[in-house]
């Protein structure tokens, strides 16, 4: 099952967790310093909260979480086939998870397609890959 991902910048993580727990009737699937995520079944949504009190936009990034690396590759082929530019990160650590992912470039918000390979004990890679068109590719604040 694929699900839409909505990553939000929030002022106060604890109050945001309380609000969205009540709104969706579920507790977070993961809580780490400055970070929480919800794996909501109905509607199928991966809601990510990133404590970022200085953010000027409430949206941190958008995406689609898929189940397998093969699905990531198939989506990359489809997206590039229609002419959208992408930035492939491949296997990387982001949002306290090891993920295989790529980013679609050119829209108003960062947009990723990814699958989670394993849990991780840090927010992001210490030496994340970037290009001039793809700075701040991880979900870090």
Image: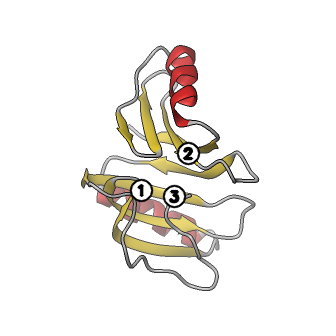
Secondary structure of the residue carrying tag 3 is: loop
Which-is-in-front pick, marks 3 and 1? Answer: 3
Q: CA separation, marks 3 and 1?
A: 12 Å
Compare residues 77 and 43 and report the one nearer the observer: 43
In the rendered image, which quarter contains the N terminus? top left
> Which sits earlier in the primary sequence, circle 3 or circle 1?
1
Give the image location of residue 21, x and y in percent: 49, 20
**Residue sitting at 40 percent across and 22 percent down?**
27
59 left or right, relative to 21: right
71 left or right, relative to 5: left
In the rendered image, which quarter contains the C terminus? bottom right
Residues packed near mark 3 inside 10 Å, few (<14), some (14 to 19) or many (20 plus): many
34 left or right, relative to 51: left
- Whether residues under marks 3 and 2 lie with C-beta atoms below 8 angstroms apart, the answer is no
Q: CA separation, marks 2 and 1?
A: 22 Å
Residues packed near mark 2 inside 10 Å, few (<14), some (14 to 19) or many (20 plus): many
The residue indicated by pointer 1 is 114
Give the image location of residue 36, x and y in percent: 44, 39
Q: Quadrant of residue 82?
A: bottom right
Outermost residue toward the left? 118
112 in relation to 6, above or below: below
Give the image location of residue 9, x and y in percent: 62, 46
20 in relation to 141, above or below: above
Q: Quadrant of residue 31?
A: top left
Compare residues 33 and 48 and report the one nearer the observer: 33
Secondary structure of the residue carrying tag 2 is: strand
Which-is-in-front pick, marks 3 and 2? Answer: 2
**Residue sitting at 51 percent across and 64 percent down?**
78
- Whether residues under marks 2 and 1 lie with C-beta atoms below 8 angstroms apart, the answer is no
Secondary structure of the residue carrying tag 1 is: strand
**Residue sitting at 41 percent across and 63 percent down?**
101
The residue indicated by pointer 3 is 139
């Amino acid at each position: 099952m694929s699900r839409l991902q909505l990553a939000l910048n929030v002022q106060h993580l604890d109050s945001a967790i309380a609000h969205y727990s009540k709104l969706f009737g579920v507790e977070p699937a993961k809580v780490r310093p400055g970070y929480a995520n919800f794996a909501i079944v109905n509607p199928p949504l991966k809601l990510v909260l990133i404590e970022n009190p200085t953010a000027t936009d409430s949206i941190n990034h958008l995406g689609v979480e898929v189940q397998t690396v093969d699905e990531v590759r198939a989506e990359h082929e489809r997206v590039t086939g229609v002419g959208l530019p992408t930035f492939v990160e491949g296997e990387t650590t982001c949002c306290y998870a090891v993920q295989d992912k790529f980013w679609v470039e050119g829209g108003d918000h960062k947009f990723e397609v990814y699958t989670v390979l394993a849990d991780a004990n840090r927010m992001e890679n210490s030496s994340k890959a970037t290009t001039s068109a793809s700075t701040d590719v991880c979900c870090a604040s």
